[in-house]
Amino acid sequence: MDSTGSEGVGGTKDVVKRIFEDAMRSRGIFKNREVLNIDYIPENIPFREEQIKRLAGILSPVVKGVKPSNVFLYGKTGTGKTMVARYVAGVLERTLHDEKTKIAYVNCRQSGTVYRTLFEIGNVMGYSAPFTGISLSELQGRVLQHISSNGYRLTVILDEVDFLVNSPVKRDAGNDMLYQMTRFGSYEGGGSFISIIGISNDLRFKEYLDARVFSGLRDEEIFFPPYSVEELKVILRERVKEAFVEGAVSDEVINYIAARAGGEHGDARRAVDLLRVAGEIAEREGSDAITISHVEEAAASVERDKVKEAISSLPIHEKLVLLSVLSFEQPQNTGYIYLKYTEYCKALGVQPLTQRRISSIISELDVLGLLSAPVVNSGRYGRTKKVSSAVPREEALAHLKEDEAIKYLF
DNA sequence: CTTCCACAGGAATAGGGGGTCC
DNA sequence: GGACCCCCTATTCCTGTGGAAG
């Protein structure tokens, strides 16, 4: 840990001073760390020429004020869908000299609800709606009205569009919104239109879609295959050239990152992320090059941060459920978890929630990756979830103890 | 082959805090 | 102020179910 007191002649102050001096003396290994941000769009996007050309071709009518086909981009995470869409949209935007032609980017998952997605689109189009209070259909009507009455021609990128329809609660609203948007213009006249670039990595997506919406949404499709490890190496090498000073990242390290991040399904975002965090760690250590062990540490640190973030932002009942699961060595049935949970509630003087709710919470924690809770059938002995922790026990407990209330359950 | 466990998980509903609109 | 809206958590009630025990 940290050595209190003074080492050698200098005191704490000198130690701190030395850290700053070290930081100043070393040239630093970063040249331009912006290049490693998630939303950085490089000049050159390798291995995606074909997709870029196709998307540009499909969108080209826009420059003449004509509605292009709707496009659907699909492929797994980190295969460059968003980057390509933003890249092409960016170039398109810069070649336009037309007030009426707009390009909007909305991430449907970040927006969270159909309402807020529409709200965002309205915002980009210069219509500020109340962020709550009016009905969805009212908002939808207003935004579309705003677009048509101003004669706007809109190309909207709906990233993670599956989130508009993937829950039963949203399904109808999401379908309706997409339906209205795909139909928009066909009856408006006046040159106003909306074209949609949909992006999704969930291939079950179409199951949730209304058939009419589905066919309307993908006049065209562009597939993004995973990057191979070799391709990842090229991508990393290009980023390294831009981001780091010469000699800071060896080929060996690049290969290691590519293998590590790309091994499963060629996720470039993950690879670049790993590179960035490894660089930050190396920098903090005052090292002038990234080593394999920096990368390993980076991978562990990314994982730890995720767990910490996930646990500390949990509401109290979720934390208690997690604690209940951790109190067992072996995987347990929902029923036993629930019993333990009610004990904890009693100890804290909190009113326990119903088992139905706890069952949902267990599922939510499963989705978050904190728990593993597959449903198992034990014949005569019923049907339940076998709940166990999906994160290191001690680590999870440490985070839970940060909570003021839970601390007293030691 | 039937029974029956121990829940899963859908549906309807409520309520409370955020709001708009007239 | 009253009608109505969104969003989220939570409750109540409910029907469904794979397979070991009998």
Image: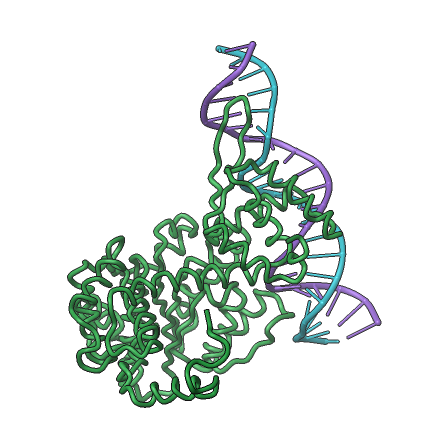
Chain colours: A green, B cyan, C purple
Is residue A195 depicted above or below A226 in this figure? below
Q: Give the residue at the far front of this rendering.
A: A8
Instruction: Say which quarter of the image contains residue A313.
Output: bottom right
The picture places residue A20, in percent across and down from the top left corner, at 39, 87
The residue lying toward the viewer, choosing from A289 and A164, is A289
Instruction: Say which quarter of the image contains residue A91.
Output: bottom left
Q: Residue at 20% of width from left, 64% of height from top?
A: A232
| Tally of numbered discs | 0
Is residue C18 depicted above or below A34 in this figure? above
Instruction: Say which quarter of the image contains residue A319.
Output: bottom right
The picture places residue A74, in percent across and down from the top left corner, at 30, 58
The residue lying toward the viewer, choosing from A57 and A152, is A57
Is residue A217 depicted above or below A86 in this figure? above
Q: Is residue A64 visible to the viewer in this orientation of the structure?
A: no
Q: Is residue A18 visible to the viewer in this orientation of the structure?
A: yes
The picture places residue A76, in percent across and down from the top left corner, at 30, 57
Q: Residue at 58% of width from left, 59% of height from top?
A: A314
The picture places residue A295, in percent across and down from the top left corner, at 29, 65
Q: Residue at 65% of width from left, 45% of height from top?
A: A341
The residue lying toward the viewer, choosing from A325 and A47, is A325
Is residue A354 depicted above or below A77 in this figure? above
